[in-house]
Amino acid sequence: KKAAPWGVAPTFEWVATNFAKLLMLDAECVHPYEGCDENDCSMRRYAIGPPAAAPEEEEEESEEDSEDDEDAETEAMRERLAALLQEVEHHGHGGYGGEERKKLTPEEIEQKRKEAEELGEKCRILSKKERGELNKTRKEKAGHRLAKTGQKNRKYEGEGATSKEDKKKKNKENVKKRFGLS
């Protein structure tokens, strides 16, 4: 090997072997994030960048100003809480949003009862026999042809195949031979 000027090749070799150590020298420059690989699986990845800027601290205000601000915030919270409590007390113990629960009229009661009866018929529990009739097994379905047309004829009828007439003739001859009628 020819020696590279200024020792660049050995420097790159050292960086390649000690890359993790090099990154951890300044951990503030390594920023983790969630990434996706080629299979759309989320995985943790790292980006190298400038160190995160520290949040700028505001100039210290005088203690009196900060206390006044805190007092104003707490007073505003108390007022808001008092308003909410008053609203709840004013509307009573109704539903959410201050809705009062109203009583149903006899017509509405009768209507709800009819709706419940209709739903009851729809949701009626079936007996074991009724469920069996609705959901037949493969063997129970066998023998009940659902198609409107007849069976598909799959027998080969090309050149060299015997036709139905030929078979009938041969069958008749065989019967005659068997019973001695020929």
Image (cartoon, rainbow, N blue to C red):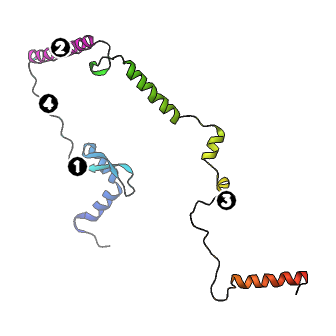
Residue denoted by label 2 = 79
Is residue 81 shown in magenta?
yes
**Nearest to viewer (mark 1 / mark 3):** 3
Marks 4 and 1, how far apart in space? 23 Å
User: Could you say which is closer to the camera, residue 37 or residue 84?
Assistant: 84
From this view, report whether residue 100 is shown above or below residue 44. above
**Quadrant in the picture for the C terminus:** bottom right
Q: Residue at x 27, y 46 (%)?
A: 30
Residue 41 image offset from top left, x and y in percent: 39, 51
* Mark 2 crowdedness (10 Å alpha carbons): few <14, some 14-19, many ≥20: few
Q: Quadrant of residue 177?
A: bottom right
Q: Which residues are magenta?
A: 63-91
**Mark nearer the N terminus (3 vs 4):** 4
Per the image, the residue denoted by label 1 is 49
- Badge 4: few (under 14), some or many (20 or more) residues near its Cα, within 10 Å? few
Task: Please give the residue where the numbered disc 4 appears in the rendered image.
Answer: 57
